[in-house]
Image (spheres, rainbow, N blue to C red):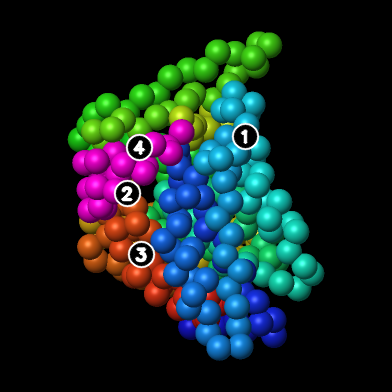
């Protein structure tokens, strides 16, 4: 497999959170990455809060489209100095944000990494992978999750809101995490949206932009939210440069197996940037 090299001593790593979460969920991985930079090199680690997520001040009704939601990540990429690239690591719904960023700025992305994340292809609308998972084959129950319509704003359709329920959170998302991290998550998760209404009408990402970016998929084998079977289906549907596995990781691998996630990211950064 060919690898890319860069003369810059700073390696940019952007960690992109998933639905209802924020940059806070990367705290273990971000801290470790900042402490393991190889000699003579530094890792610049950014875990942005996407719009109306984490500590971002916007409310969900102010964010109309998936592009609006992803804007903080796009702004980070746009601000990179000329000639510098970033490794983007998307988790869960964050994979769709990483894909959009790769479509918009392929020349600024050293590698797009999907950590048990939704990974779109170049033939279907970005919503396809999300809808395929929720078609009924992979989940036996939504338990106490809540999906609700938002009131229209001046006649304009707003995306449906979504909230993970506490039972689903413990049984499907954080089942291998510590009680402390479960408590933290329940206190910090916000109502979010998958923006399906918008994603359904978007054109597929292009083969010459998103399709040209190097991709790595990190399979989390004990994930109950995006099960291993579905992760591997996405890889077969949209082949990548490399597949890495983490055994023992639930959906929140950055919290349940942070050292393994860090090792994967460091290896990817050194290969592709």
- Whether residue 174 appears in magenta in the rendering, the answer is yes
**Residue annotated with mark 3:** 258
Quarter assignment of residue 257: bottom left
Q: Quadrant of residue 8?
A: bottom right
Please report the bounds of the magenta region as a residue range: 169-190
Drawn side of residue 184 relative to residue 93, left or right: left
Q: Which numbered disc covers residue 186?
A: 4
Are circles 2 and 1 on residues that touch, CB within 8 Å?
no
**For the residue carrying disc 1, how many other residues have a C-alpha within 10 Å: few (<14), some (14-19), or many (20+)?**
few
The answer to whether 246 is drawn above or below residue 163 in the figure is below
Mark 1 lies on a secondary structure that is: loop
Number of other residues with Cα within 10 Å of mark 3, as a class: few under 14, some 14 to 19, many 20 or more? some
For disc 2, the marked residue is: 181
Residue drawn at (61%, 88%), measured in percent from left and top? 40
Q: How many marks?
A: 4
Q: Give the distance between the C-alpha atoms of the residues marked 4 and 3, in whole angstroms.
A: 19 Å
- Is residue 267 shown above or below 146? below
Q: CA distance from mark 4 to mark 2?
A: 9 Å
């Amino acid at each position: 497999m060919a690898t890319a090299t860069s003369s810059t001593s700073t390696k940019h790593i952007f960690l992109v959170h998933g639905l209802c979460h924020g940059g806070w969920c990367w705290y273990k991985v971000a801290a470790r990455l900042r402490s393991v930079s190889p000699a003579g090199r530094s890792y610049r680690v950014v875990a942005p809060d996407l719009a109306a997520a984490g500590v971002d001040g916007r409310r969900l009704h102010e964010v109309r489209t998936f592009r609006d939601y992803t804007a903080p990540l796009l702004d980070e990429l746009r601000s990179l100095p000329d000639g510098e690239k970033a490794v983007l690591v998307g988790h869960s719904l964050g994979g769709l944000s990483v894909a959009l960023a790769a479509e918009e700025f392929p020349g600024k992305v050293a590698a797009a990494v999907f950590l048990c994340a939704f990974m779109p292809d170049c033939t279907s609308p970005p919503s396809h992978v999300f809808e395929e998972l929720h078609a009924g084959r992979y989940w036996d129950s939504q338990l106490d999750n809540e999906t609700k319509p938002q009131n229209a704003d001046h006649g304009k359709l707003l995306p449906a809101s979504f909230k993970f329920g506490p039972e689903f959170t413990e049984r499907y998302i954080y089942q291998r995490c510590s009680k402390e991290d479960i408590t933290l998550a329940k206190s910090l998760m916000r109502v979010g949206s998958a923006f399906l209404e918008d994603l359904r009408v978007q054109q597929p990402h292009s083969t010459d932009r998103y399709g040209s970016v190097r991709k790595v998929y990190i399979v989390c084998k004990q994930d109950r939210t995006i099960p291993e079977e579905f992760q591997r289906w996405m890889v077969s549907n949209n082949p990548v440069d490399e597949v890495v596995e983490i055994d023992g990781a639930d959906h929140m691998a950055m919290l349940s197996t942070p050292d393994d996630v860090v090792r994967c990211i460091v290896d990817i950064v050194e290969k592709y940037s």
